[in-house]
Amino acid sequence: MLHVNMVKILKRLTFGLDSEERRWERPGPTGDHLRRDVIGVVIFFLVSALALELSRGVGAMAEERSPVWLQHAVLALMIFPLVFRRRFPVLVMLVMSALFIILSLWIPALSLQLSYQVAYFASLYSAVAWAKDRRVLWLGTTVVVVAMTLWLILSLTVANTYDGLLERVAEGDETWRGIFDPLTSAALYYFMVNFAYFGGAILAGMSSWRNALQRTQLADQATQIARQSAELARRAVIEERLRIARELHDVVAHHVSVIGVQAAAARRVMDRKPEVAAESLRTIEQASRQAVTDMRNLLGVLRSETSVQNPHNDDDGRHPEPGLADIAALAGNQQDGGPEVTFSRVEDVPGALDEVSAPLALSLYRTAQESLTNVRRHSTASAAVMTLRTGRTGEQRWVELETVDNGRPRQRVAAGSGYGLQGIRERVALHRGTAEIGPRSDGGWRVRARFPLQ
């Protein structure tokens, strides 16, 4: 009955899994596993041989008449199949089950050795932990359980174990008086011992198998997440570049269109060398318009991906692109429910910020926008300082936007994707500038983007 329960437990553990888990096969052992198994088994045998001799010294093997060398040989025969316990787990379990019964009948006193019992326990555990085909494992375990049940029955009947108990009771041995009669006591005792033995091996092996399955699933999930993150990052960079391309197109196209209009006007009013001027201005007009046409055609290819992704996006509506003058208003709009933002402009030369080109001004505005969004969503900051400044390093003049806050990353809010900060880096790289983004040594967070001025 006990062993039938063990089979039911294993069957429930095995077939209680979903279909994907049942199809999963634990990867076989590596060369490193095999080397460790060989070393471990050798050490285990040496310790077991020493334990056998120590037990002999206290009389545990007094009734055994077989040669000492044979006892050690039998012990080695029981232990050394464990070398292959990971590579052939079910086969090793079946072999060691047969050895356990045969050797126990041959040298009964040896089967009482702790190392002998531990070796068989290890074979049961390894079979459940490493078997690839779980149905074969269940069938093999059924065979083992039936064989062990028969062996226990034989040990209590043919081996006259129970008759010996009855004789000792009949002789008046008071140590055998208990709350139950000898037959019930023996049956319950063997039930508890075998339940703990086989149940512990099965549960420990199943726990190891499930842990291996979870590790594999976590590794697969981590790989999938990394792949998806890389794809999302790639898409975010592409979308950011497409947005930059649209903005640059609008700014540059506007100025080039103005050149075309002014050149056409000059051709009509100029009276000095009208033929030459008219021809030159006509060339300028045609070249500027052709440049706008080519630029629209080229960037239209880049826009097509965004147009497909956002079919409801209306690109016909034109709005003035924001610039440096709009950064102060952007900082002021953060006061509503957000950190207090202080904005300042610093010019090393009066009027230096007025010389910033429209594309660069737009990139500075977008940088300020992303910086403040990062502070508002992902920081505990109560205040932030934003500074727009110009300066010179050697012969190179530059303009930079720096945002500094006094907060820490929010712990209970999911981490951001990082695409906004990636967009800042993309804009800075577009203008061949430098970006410094990260925590400060004295606390808070800094976003500093420096762009060279031509």
Image (cartoon, rainbow, N blue to C red):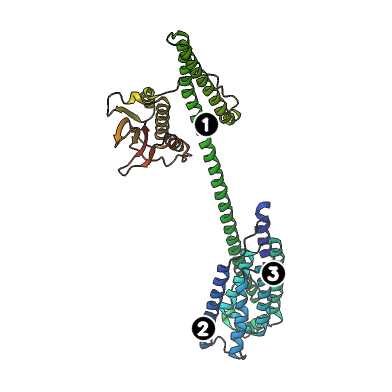
The answer to whether residue 14 is left or right of residue 411 is: right
Disc 1 to disc 2, how far (Cα)? 76 Å
Q: Amino acid at mark 2?
A: Leu
The answer to whether one can see residue 63 in this image is no
Give yes or no for contact between labels 3 and 1 (Cβ–Cβ under 8 Å): no
Q: Amino acid at mark 3?
A: Val
First of labels 2, 3 by sequence position: 2
Whether 238 is drawn above or below 165: the answer is above
Is the residue marked by circle 2 packed among few (<14), some (14-19), or many (20+) residues within 10 Å? few
Whether 147 is drawn above or below 368: the answer is below
Residue under numbered circle 3: 145
| Foreground residue among 53 and 256 | 256
The answer to whether one can see residue 273 in this image is yes
The answer to whether residue 104 is left or right of residue 298 is: right
Dot in front, 1 or 2: 1
Where residue 210 sits in the image (x, y, percent)?
59, 58
Dot in front, 2 or 3: 2
Where residue 233 sits in the image (x, y, percent)?
52, 40
Numbered badge on residue 242: 1
Under circle 1, the secondary element is helix
| Foreground residue among 344 and 197 | 344
Q: Quadrant of residue 369?
A: top left
